[in-house]
Amino acid sequence: MKVLLYGRLAEAIDHKLELDAPSCCSVAELRAQLVASHPATAEPLKRSRVLVGNVVADDGRILQPEDRVEFLPPVSGG
Amino acid sequence: MSVVARLEPGQLHPERELAAFAGQARGDGAIVSFVGLARPESASGGRVDTLVLEHHEVLTHRSLGEIAVACAERFDVSHVRVVHRCGTIPAGEAIVFAGTSSRHRRAAFDAADYLMDRLKTEAVFWKREVGADGANWIEATAADAADRERWG
């Protein structure tokens, strides 16, 4: 599964992660997994919108191995 | 009526944008243009060398377009043009050009004001200043949010 990160999340973690799909199954669980592995980013991770394939996904969305998941922290504006 | 919303990864030339916009707005009685510049100083007074605007490959351009279209629908304007830079912007250079034109001045003023209030809070960018104090992420201020709220 591809995970894309932006803003301060990208700076703290990486712009792109490749994760093994079986290691998580819902958006909420993926978020919790990222918080556990990068505790300093807990606050922006919790405030992030999540997109799966360019569509907003809620925490209950079940992720598939081929999904492209994006975590978007609150935007700065222009 | 025309609505232009462009994401510019290179340098932004406000005078060229204004000239192009004025060419489109022939026949109107008013053109209002706004140019936003990268400030050389942070809110705490530190030197800023560059502003970095990270963008999303789909959502950023979409957000510019949605704001420009909403502006054109809300106000009695003939033309709307938004050009916004992304990437690394040296202090002092232009970040954004916003232009509106209308038959009479009031609509053009209000439309440009609305455009910038929405762009400052809703355009999909993640922004950081890089300079004497290192790199600092910037978020919209309470004043920016209050300006945005004026429009409902």
Image (tube, grey):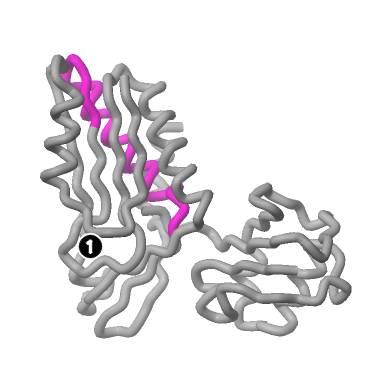
Q: Residue at x 16, y 51 (%)?
A: B13
> Quick one: B35 or A68, which is closer to the camera?
A68
Q: Which residue is mark 1?
A: B38
Q: Residues within 10 Å of mark 1 (few under 14, many from 20)?
A: some
Percent of width and height locating residue B121: 42, 49
- On the picture, is B42 further left or further right than A58? left
Q: Main secondary structure of the magenta part?
A: helix
Q: Residue at x 44, y 46 (%)?
A: B61
Is residue B129 shown above or below B117?
Answer: below
Question: Which amino acid type corresponds to the residue marked 1 in the rendered image?
Answer: Ala
Is residue B27 shown above or below B140?
Answer: above
Q: Would you say residue B54 sits in the magenta stretch? A: no
> Quick one: B114 or A16, which is closer to the camera?
A16
Count of residue discs = 1
Q: Residue at x 19, y 15 (%)?
A: B103
> Quick one: B42 or A9, which is closer to the camera?
A9
Q: Quadrant of the N terminus of chain A?
A: bottom right
Is residue B123 shown above or below B129?
Answer: above
* Displayed quadrant of residue A68: bottom right
Percent of width and height locating residue B147: 35, 43
Q: Which residues are magenta?
A: B100-125
> Quick one: A71 or A4, which is closer to the camera?
A4
Q: Would you say residue B114 sits in the magenta stretch? A: yes
Q: Residue at x 51, y 73 (%)?
A: A8
Q: Chain of mark 1?
A: B
Percent of width and height locating residue B108: 23, 26
Percent of width and height locating residue B100: 24, 30
